[in-house]
Image (cartoon, rainbow, N blue to C red):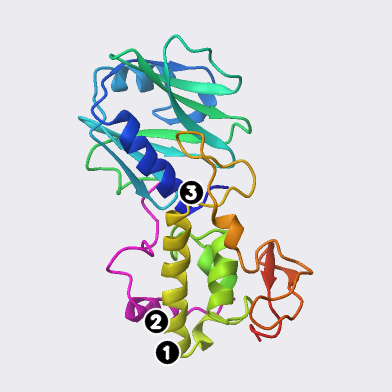
Amino acid sequence: MPELPEVETVVRTLRTLVLNKKIERVSVLLPRIIRRPADVEQFKSILVGQTIHAVERRAKFIKFILDQDVLISHLRMEGRYGVYQSSEEIEKHTHVIFHFTDGTELRYRDVRQFGTMDVIPLGKEQEVEPLKKLGPEPLDEAFTPTLLSSMLQRKTTKIKPLLLNQEFMVGLGNIYVDEALFRANIHPERVANTLTNQQIEILHTSIVQTLQEAIDAGGSSIKSYVNGQGEMGMFQQVLKVYGKKGELCPSCSTEIVKIVVGGRGTHFCPSCQK
């Protein structure tokens, strides 16, 4: 599933492709992609005539800011967007098409068909699902070591599943949690509220740096992720532990191991992360 860096990369690419385009009509070829409003015809009619003024990210969601509404999209496992000329052939697994007045189209393609779209009145999007219960953004200025410390104080769960919980903190998926914990020398099964202040400061830095470096590299194309222009991310070239089972730790040459923590495959160095 695309994580924060991948979604941020898609958002930045889409800004160069769809800003100020006006929606002439909408084609929905797979109705179950649409969650709100439940009536697909209403979904289409709401969007017709509106212009895309901004493209933003909240957690792993893409927000298209329109005249009166916000279109909220989640890519799930393999969803992807692309902009095409209306004359270009429609690829298989294309489920939603936004036809613009300039003759171009924003097409949503999803082989696994797990993606979702919601249209919510502008200004109300934080009050309802799917954005209502999301935790803080790790790349916001408000996310400080002090805030992270206060968030961890009463958490008696293991640190790995806690960081994956989008109500605790948004945007961190399996890849980047493993990488951040390795950088911070913290075992993935460490109980969250047992971390020292020094460890919390290091963890904070590790989370921010890992995500920022991944964004700068265009994300990680571990499976099928590409950005809005079909380009792969390159952060997978510099991963330290994720997917490295049996390889040597880049810090101490101990063999990287893989265990299951909170139902997720987890990679770490048993020497560096005791």
- SS assignment at label 1: helix
Whether 152 is drawn above or below 30: the answer is below
Q: Which is in the foreground here, disc 1 or disc 3? A: 3
Percent position of residue 157, x then y: 57, 76
Residue 197 got which mark? 1
Query: Which residue is more in the foreground, 122 or 60?
Result: 60
Q: Mark 1 packing: few (<14 Cα in 10 Å), some, or many (20+)? A: few
Real-space Cα separation, disc 1 to disc 3, in angstroms: 30 Å
Percent position of residue 219, x then y: 50, 51
Whether 257 is drawn above or below 80: the answer is below
Real-space Cα separation, disc 2 to disc 1, in angstroms: 7 Å
Give the residue number, with chain letter if any, for mark 2.
149
Q: Amino acid at mark 1?
A: Asn
Residue 6 got which mark? 3
Q: Amino acid at mark 2?
A: Ser
In percent of the image, x 43 and y 26: which residue is there? Answer: 38
Q: Amino acid at mark 3?
A: Glu
Whether the residues at callouts 2 and 1 have beta carbons within 8 Å, the answer is yes
Residue 49 placement: quadrant? top left
Does label 3 or label 2 sit earlier along the sequence? Answer: 3
